[in-house]
Amino acid sequence: MDRVKEILLDALRLGADVEGEQRLYQSGKLPGLFTGRTSLHAEIASQAVRDGLIEIIRTESKGKTTTEWVKVTAKGIEYLLAQESPIRAMEELKAVLQLNQDGIPAWLMELRRSVDALSQRLANEVEALNRRMESLTERVVEALKRAEKMGPALPEGAAGALPWGHEAVSYLERRRDGGLGEKCALPELFAVLKDKENGLVLRDFHLGLRRLHDRGVLRLLPFDGPEGPPEPEYALLDGPQVFYYAAR
């Protein structure tokens, strides 16, 4: 992974773990997505904003200093999960295995020219290594095929009534497997689904969540902060409970 992508992924990972807005750049002991205003960090941050991975919420000016307050967008979280997906890691492993496998014949010829006395022994060892490489490559390919076909298990009838039900469950699983935690804030989940289902409105989103919760497909979890949720319009009320998170 190159240095630019590493810095970007670290910033997105940090932003995904914090609810609400936060500083774009760290200032003294005050946290921020990027550790400083270096030219490299500024270039990466500007590109992330242009690409829609980070959204500037507001700015504050004190004297000659301007502070940008930002948050990671749903697109930014999708990008982070795609980069850290187990399937992507297996794809990279497959490529490395294939590269090594293709390089074996040339390597063997060179050894035969330089060490004729050991040629047969080396040929047998390389052949065994090649068979192990082929076997491991086949296992990776099969694992990729199984991973691509796997989908969230929804009870019969739930997906038909909720066209976005599979996507909601799949996103919660990708988020969890990507190391971003079990709980997903409802504003974040709604933004992801809204991007794929243009006609989705908040009322139908709430009704669908209740249905998936009642069927045991996902869990609705309450907000436990002292001052109430930061975006209360997305909260789902159920008697005294104020649900603000969803989990698989």
Image (cartoon, helix red, strand yellow):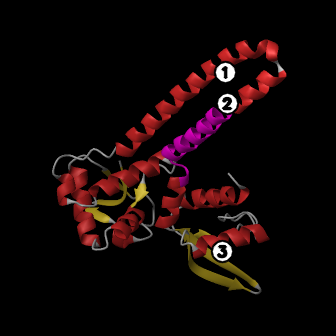
Q: Position of residue 44 (x, y in %)?
A: 68, 68
Q: Look at label 1 and name its amino acid.
A: Val
Closer to viewer: mark 1 or mark 3: 1
Circle nearer the N terminus (1, 2)? 2
Q: Position of residue 100 (x, y in %)?
A: 65, 34
**Secondary structure state at the residue bearing disc 1:** helix
- Residue placed farthest to the bottom in the image? 63
Are there few (<14), some (14-19), or many (20+) residues within 10 Å of tag 3? few
Along the line of sight, the residue nearer the viewer: 56 or 60: 56
Q: Position of residue 145 (x, y in %)?
A: 40, 40
Q: Look at label 2 and name its amino acid.
A: Ile
| Tag 1 near tag 3, CB within 8 Å | no
Question: Which disc is residue 226 wearing?
Answer: none
- Residue placed farthest to the right in the image? 114
Along the line of sight, the residue nearer the viewer: 214 or 177: 177
Are there few (<14), some (14-19), or many (20+) residues within 10 Å of tag 2? some
Are there few (<14), some (14-19), or many (20+) residues within 10 Å of tag 1? some
Q: Specify whether 161 is left or right of 56.
A: left
Tell me the CA gap for discs 1 and 3: 50 Å
Closer to viewer: mark 2 or mark 3: 2
Q: Which residue is mark 1?
A: 126
Question: Which disc is residue 46 wearing?
Answer: 3
**Secondary structure state at the residue bearing disc 2:** helix
Q: Position of residue 116 (x, y in %)?
A: 80, 16
Tell me the CA gap for discs 1 and 2: 8 Å
Q: Which residue is mark 2?
A: 104
Q: Is residue 91 magenta?
A: yes
| Tag 1 near tag 2, CB within 8 Å | yes
Q: Is residue 239 at least partly visible in the picture?
A: no
Q: Look at label 3 and name its amino acid.
A: Ser
| Span highlighted in magenta in the image | 83-103
